[in-house]
Amino acid sequence: MAGLAASFGSGAMTNSIEEIEFANAILVTGSNTSEDHPVIATRIKKAVKEHGAKLVVADPRRIDLVDFAALWLRHRPGTDVALFNSIMHVIIEEGLEAKQYIAERTEDFDALKEAVREYTPEFAEKITGVPAKDIIEAAGIAAKADAFSIIYAMGITQHTHGTDNVKSLANLSLLTGNIGRESGGVNPLRGQNNVQGACDMGALPNVFPGYQKVSDPTSNEKFASAWGTELPDKPGLTVVEMLNGVIAGDIKALYILGENPALSDPNLNHSREGLDKVDFLVVQDIFLTETAKFADVVLPGVSFAEKDGTFTNTERRVQRVRKAINPPGQAMQDWWIIREIAKRMGSEMNYSGPLEITREINELTPSYAGITCDRLDTCSLQWPCPSDDHPGTKFLHQGQCVRGKGKFHAVKYIESDELPDKDFPLLLTTGRVLHQFHTGTMTRKSNAIELVAGEPFVEVSTQDAGNLGISNGDVVKLRSRRGEISVNAVVGSMVAPGVVFMPFHYSEAPVNFLTNDKLDPVAKIPEFKVCAVALEKG
């Protein structure tokens, strides 16, 4: 890891799941934890109910955790930086910042202090809609806790200013002295079971395994030598950029493994145009997904229960996975399929199986060097684990930040790319529900799950519904500048007036026909969480 920024950039939790239960104060923002990460939500609830922790929830929706919260900050979608800057403004104005910690373990505090100077609670209230008194109360809870844990998910990152949102949360944790503190830290929650492991192993366009940059000559030479081939030294493209490249005529072939962009990407008319236009499309998956229906070749892979190897979860914990059942039909191990394709393209990728692949990971990835198969037979380990006798790392940056000193970033509030106007007067935000998983590739094949959560819906506030003549259960039409869908309305108090919410699991009403594909300029993540829409009775 290159330092503090790397731990956030890789999406890894600085601390462990079990530590959450013993935090004195917890901020949950951009995460409907009870529905998206229910096991972690139980830790949060235990912290409140059994250990007296004060929970602050910052979310535009009335999610389940609001019932356990000492304070609910119901901010307008996309105004996160203004909210966090205002909380930090209060902490500094009241002299509650961790002065000794800041002096000894951080840099650029003066730049942060200047950046948040204008974000008084009254100023932030006008932007966010959160009452000034609640901002002041949140600042006191965060600053006065012995251990303050920040928990977030894609409600923070899926914005055109998502990088700024994450930097602001890092600023808040540094300001209160909680980076490198047990039960503190900044803890992003991953959206699927091995997203962390995939990123750790280089499934990002700018790094090799272990976040070793492709642009670094030493790293590049190391992997080129190990793999016996010349490697690019410039970052590649993200998913949205790849499909843009197809439409522009720059990319002629796509190989998609375990991803369903025909349902999960923003601005689906545009995404599906790319999938339809590409000269050659290969999809490797366990079912015939919406994306696989566009494919020239479909390669049947295997499910978690049909493979050997490891998964790395959101707290950096590497766990051994063992094959429990044989795969059906012509389905083959994913590593085997990749190896065989590589061989036919002239690469001598002669791995004999997961054990040999794991040994290569140990050799080339310093943070995984001590996470061997022999050790994983008897326990799980958290990276960084640099040697065979290392116990793994429960929480990061203990004693000092890996980069030396934690860096404050002077971040200003920037509006979302697309705001409501007279033609599209409402803000749409998207997310998940407890019973369904991602694009429903697996969960929507369960009759029991479909009985409970088998129909798409859009949440509408009672006030907006009354103004539009909409009743609970009515079919409504939802439109954006990119498309339109019809769906049943759920009327109530889950969302504030001016905001509507819809889950993205459902192929019969794909909300991503509406969402905005504008990207964060740094992380290149699309703005799923904010776009302007119009709603009318269908």
Image (tube, rainbow, N blue to C red):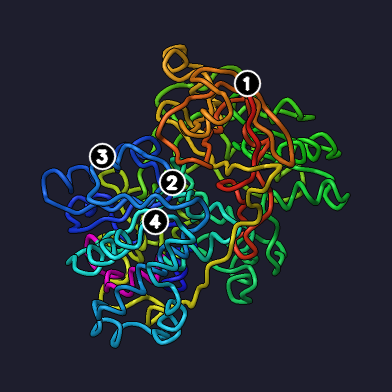
Circle 2 packing at 10 Å, graded few (<14), some (14-19), many (20+), is: many
Amino acid type at image mark 3? Asp
Evaluate if marks 2 and 1 touch, with contact meaning CB atoms under 8 Å apart: no
Evaluate if marks 4 and 3 touch, with contact meaning CB atoms under 8 Å apart: no
Asked whether 501 or 333 is in front, the reply is: 501
Q: Mark 4 or mark 1: which is in front? A: 4
Q: Which residue is mark 2?
A: 60
Q: Which mark is residue 330?
A: 1
- Does dot 3 land on a helix, a strand or a loop? helix
Amino acid type at image mark 4? Val
Please identify the residue farthest to the front as the structure is shown.
Answer: 467
Alpha carbon distance from label 4 to label 2? 10 Å
Q: Is residue 491 visible?
A: yes
Alpha carbon distance from label 4 to label 3? 18 Å
Give the number of callouts. 4
Name the residue at 36% across, 57% down. 131
Q: Earlier in the sequence, mark 3 or mark 1?
A: 3
Q: Which residue is mark 3?
A: 67
- On screen, residue 293 versus residue 466, left or right, reads right
Alpha carbon distance from label 3 to label 1? 49 Å
- Does dot 2 land on a helix, a strand or a loop? loop
Amino acid type at image mark 1? Gln
| Residue 97 screen position, x and y as percent | 27, 78
Q: Mark 4 or mark 3: which is in front? A: 4
| Residue 422 screen position, x and y as percent | 69, 45
Q: Mark 4 or mark 2: which is in front? A: 4
Which quarter of the figure is the C terminus placed in?
top right
- Does dot 4 land on a helix, a strand or a loop? loop
Evaluate if marks 4 and 1 touch, with contact meaning CB atoms under 8 Å apart: no
